[in-house]
Amino acid sequence: MSNSRFIYFAGVDGCGKSSIIKELITEYEGNGFKAKSVWLRFNYFFTRPVLLICRIIGITRREKRGSKTISVHDFHKSKTIAVLVQYLHFLDTVLAFIVKAWIPLKFTDSVILCDKFVYDILADFMVETKDLNLLNTNIARLFLKLIPKDTPVVFFSVDKEEIIRRKPEVLIDDEDYDLKYKAYQVIMNSCEFKVIENYNYEETILKAKQILGI
């Protein structure tokens, strides 16, 4: 088994992470371990007042997508606001990590399977700023320091056409899905991650268990 009790799963929306994580939690619990899933994306505390200002000046907009109403951030319209939001979001993410991961890891023996964290947030930044070179910025380097050392980082990968076939609503939920998919490809090509191609559920579970040693 992996020596780390914090395991990070990343991948573009629709690639099947959540279903796999639920199965892995069942596997851990079947082996006598406490395990839970945490979500470390979209944490807004320090960022919220600035996002309110963005609503007022038209950089952030609320849109109806299917049955959902979502916020769309056009931070490519203002580099100054984009940088401010990114650094405040860093503080929000630090706070969320402490509460949802660091404290449980410190005071319990649970295994934490993290669904959405640093790389997913950076992919969001790439889309919001329309900048696929964002990994080379200081804010990206700062975010990457949040991933604890020796953390297994597992990416799930599926062809975009297959994701759309399985979950066509991703195109409704995200008007920039093509750009988001490209952002994840850039991230996956930037480092030597453990990448699992999720085309067969049983095979994907087996590969994940092999990587994690469970």
Image: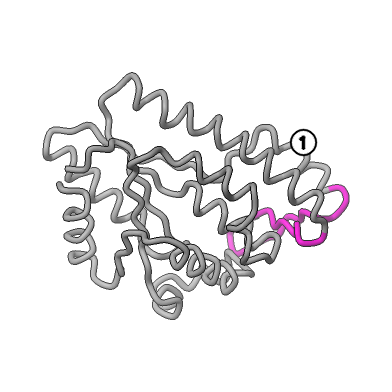
- Asked if residue 120 is positioned above or below residue 142 in the image, the reply reads below
Q: Position of residue 8 (x, y in %)?
A: 37, 47
Q: Position of residue 56 (x, y in %)?
A: 86, 47
Q: Which residue is mark 1?
A: 49
Total tally of numbered discs in the picture: 1
Furthest-left residue in this view? 31
- Residue 66 lies left or right of residue 159; in this view the side is right
Residue under the point 33% across and 19% down: 107
Which quadrant of the rendered structure holds the N terminus?
Answer: top left
Q: Quadrant of residue 102?
A: top left
Mark 1 Cα within 10 Å, few/some/many (few <14, many 20+)?
few
Indicate whether residue 195 is drawn in magenta.
no
Indicate whether residue 60 is drawn in magenta.
yes
- Asked if residue 135 is positioned above or below residue 164 in the image, the reply reads above
Q: Position of residue 122 (x, y in %)?
A: 57, 54
Where does the magenta region start and end?
56-77
Q: Quadrant of residue 188?
A: bottom left
- Residue 103 lies left or right of residue 5; in this view the side is right
Furthest-top residue in this view? 107
Q: Quadrant of residue 158?
A: bottom left
- Residue 62 lies left or right of residue 102; in this view the side is right
Residue under the point 42% across and 61% down: 191
- Asked if residue 65 is positioned above or below residue 2 in the image, the reply reads below
Furthest-bottom residue in this view? 161
Residue under the point 48% across and 26% down: 99
Q: Amino acid at mark 1?
A: Pro
The one of 116 and 84 positioned closer to us in this rendering:
84
Report the coloring of the rendering: one colour
Residue under the point 44% across and 80% down: 161
Q: Position of residue 45 (x, y in %)?
A: 65, 33
The one of 37 and 118 positioned closer to us in this rendering:
118
Instruction: Tell me the element at label 1.
Output: helix
